[in-house]
Amino acid sequence: MLSLFQQGLEIVFTVQILGLIFFGTVVGIIFGAIPGLTATMAVALFLPITYTLGPHAGISLLVGLYIGGVSGGLISAILLKIPGTPASVATTFDGGPMMEKGEGAKALGVGIAYSFIGTLLSIFALIFIAPTLAKIALSFGPHEYFSIAIFSLTLIVTLATGSMVKGIFSGALGFLFSTVGIAPVDAITRFTFGLTALNGGFDILTVLIGLFAISEIIKVAENVKTEKNATINTVTMKGFGFSMKEFWGQGWNCIRSTLIGTGIGILPGIGSGTSNIVAYMVAKKQSKYPEKFGTGIIDGVVASEAASCSAVGGAMIPLLTLGIPGDTVTAMLLGGFMIHGIQPGPLLFVSQGPLVYSIFIAMVVSSLIMLVCELYGVRLFIKMLAVPKHILLPIILVLCVVGAFGLGNRIFDVGTIVFFGLLGYGFVKCGIPQTPFIIGLILGPMAETNLRRGLMLSDGSFIGFLTEPISGAFLALAVASVVLHIFQNHRAKNPLPAAQH
């Protein structure tokens, strides 16, 4: 382990990679701070650039964008009371009122400090949990991988906000699109309609750019004319703005929220958008003064930021150990791995050990850069919030098109991002979650390939998927999660009548 750390340090501590981590973190913070732009869009936009870089440099850039993008949302959440990203929704509950009371600097200091602590603690959890989990996963066969894929998808659709039917539809549609092209086992061409460009299926990168970046551009462009220029009060920061007594007083709140964020981050497809709200509600419930939450206290900011940023390390655990993305950004990181011909999973720790540990170290370096840049760059980021959307959006759109075309020098890829952009916009309008679609698209080949391999091993019998202990357990959990969700929905819609007196 020490030798791998040493090799990871040698990889990361070069001028090129440190420069890329710094650049990625700063750009990520900017994307997170500007409402309408997210870490997801930042990673989608820069994925094509990593194609020309090596795997170490490319993944380091994406890691910086991820960490900076998740944390950057706190800036607009506090200054404008508008969450820059879904990860900072709960930060507005107390950060905004603190700003209105003239405690904006203190709110920013608390948010920056605890987003750093949450990120760092989750990275340490990643370092210690991931290798152990990878060793266990090495004993997995086709039956286990198929069952994990099914469990991951059912978990995503049941925990997706809104209708479970819409979540299942989105995931199933993603599965359907994953079958386009040449079949993995018998090489039969499917759903290509005579187009040779579809023989290889849809490129994951173009799907991600279209579904998340283009659809987001269309959605934000709808409201550009009606948006008013935000007025932001001047903020002067001295240190972190809070005392050591307040810091130690938030110790348990921070640890509890970090554990919640890391735990939720590990669950595939959920991520920081959920963890910050859950941690906030738990902090309020456990507080001695719950009535003060929402009026402008640091407890709410601590809970939200520690949880949302700790979900970053949590989401990386299933990605690196099982090859299953923890959230939408890690789904795009998976695309970054695939661009360089690297398949995340338990064998990654054996075949690409130095790369794995270079990712750990890049995450630590990025979190340190995030802390310094947010602390000393608040004035700059405040100016970034004032950039008019009608200038920003066309630039992003052009970069998306150039990135898609540069991937394979094909106009077909440009058409693909437009198609999936319109599909993603349709999802938004119909209230259909996008995450199950992209996870279905990614897990589709994994599920299909291992289903067919498992059937070959058991002479066409499905019994093996149930009799193998780990495989059977995951399938049972998949069924249980769906049944539980249906029961909870039914109970919510049909509450028990009040007792008669």
Image: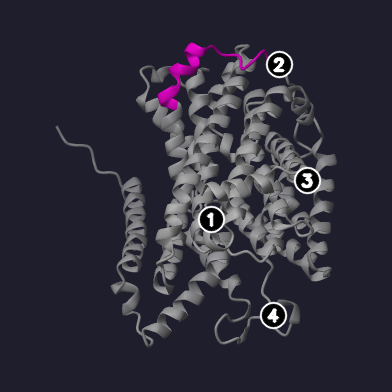
Distance from the alpha carbon under mark 4 to that under mark 2: 55 Å
Q: Is residue 362 within the magenta segment? A: no
Q: Where does label 1 land, which residue?
A: 319
- Quadrant assignment for the C terminus: top left
- In the displayed structure image, the side of residue 20 where residue 168 appears, left or right: left
Q: Where does label 2 land, which residue?
A: 235
Q: Nearer the viewer, residue 357 or 233?
A: 357
- In the displayed structure image, the side of residue 310 where residue 65 appears, left or right: right
Distance from the alpha carbon under mark 3 to that under mark 2: 34 Å
Rendered view: 224 above or below 82: below
Q: Where does label 3 land, which residue?
A: 16
Res 199 label: 4
Q: Quadrant of residue 158?
A: bottom left
Residue under the point 30% across and 67% down: 469
Q: Tell me the mark number nearer the camera, choosing from 3 and 2.
A: 3
Residue stretch in magenta:
233-253
Q: Tell me the mark number nearer the camera, choosing from 3 and 4.
A: 3
